[in-house]
Amino acid sequence: MELAPLAHVACIFYYPFPDQSASKAITNQLEKSFSETLTLFYPLAGRYAKEDLSVECNHKGGAFLEAQVSGELASVVNGGGDPKFFRRFLPLGVGEVDETKTPLVGVQVSVFKCGGLAVGVLLSHRIADAYTVATFMDAWAKVGRGASIASLKAKAGCHATRLEVVSALIWKALIAVSAKRGCLRPSLLVHSVNLRGKTGLPIPEIACGNFYMLATARFLARKEQKWSWQTWLAWWERQ
């Protein structure tokens, strides 16, 4: 936890709706399902204890804010602009992670004049990696659609073997292009690997934290090497 980045993982989701009355009902449902989802990811409802480098599970909850925007959703989505502009759609400062009073998870629902919504989500990288964020968002969506907490707890993991195949194929193609152009050189392939389901002591799929490692494979440039992508995959798996 001490080595985790001092930042929040930030996401903003945009949804068009025809009128504000529909948006209000959806906002209420989002708040209700957000509260229910936190009972499953209970560490996110606690606070970071800086001195102990731990999370105090004190059930203080996350932050849920609602904001009204006078503009149109289309002008924001299609307009681009300064990244600092989009911070107004987030509930907390991106770097406010070491404050003991700062929630570890925050949501801001911004309702536009046209009825559209911008849902900004922040999770502290002190306790959440990218997989935690994806799992939390998936669980929140399922609870919002009526899925039970019990069914989410029974969720099983899977091995991403297709990723290995595609990575080996693309890596081989890129190195082949380099060789054809006469600039063959050593290459390094790096993947961020989720450790849930891959440890001796089982880690729950819904576990919060930075449970990942970097998996690397190295290629030493040798002109005589002529491998198929299947050979590349087998060699990579031995690294």
Image (cartoon, grey):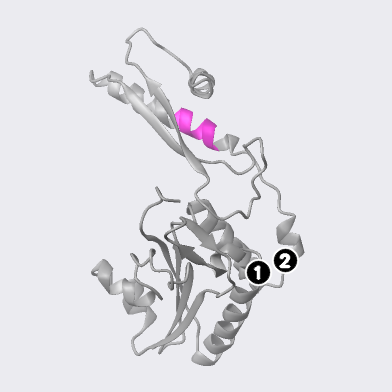
Q: Main secondary structure of the magenta part?
A: helix
Local secondary structure at mark 2 = helix
- Quarter location, residue 56: bottom right
- Residues in magenta, as a range: 163-169
Q: Residues within 10 Å of mark 1 (few under 14, many from 20)?
A: some
Q: Residues within 10 Å of mark 2 (few under 14, many from 20)?
A: some
Residue 60 position within the rendered picture, expressed as x and y whole percent measured from the top left? 55, 75
170 with respect to 194 (left or right):
left
Residue type highlighted by circle 1: Thr
Q: Nearer the viewer, residue 134 or 163?
A: 134
Q: Residue at x 41, y 50 (%)?
A: 2
* Dot label at residue 149: 2
Q: Residue at x 43, y 29 (%)?
A: 216
Residue 231 position within the rendered picture, expressed as x and y whole percent measured from the top left? 51, 17
Residues at badges 2 and 1 in contact (C-beta under 8 Å)? yes
Depicted 151 relative to depicted 75: above or below: above
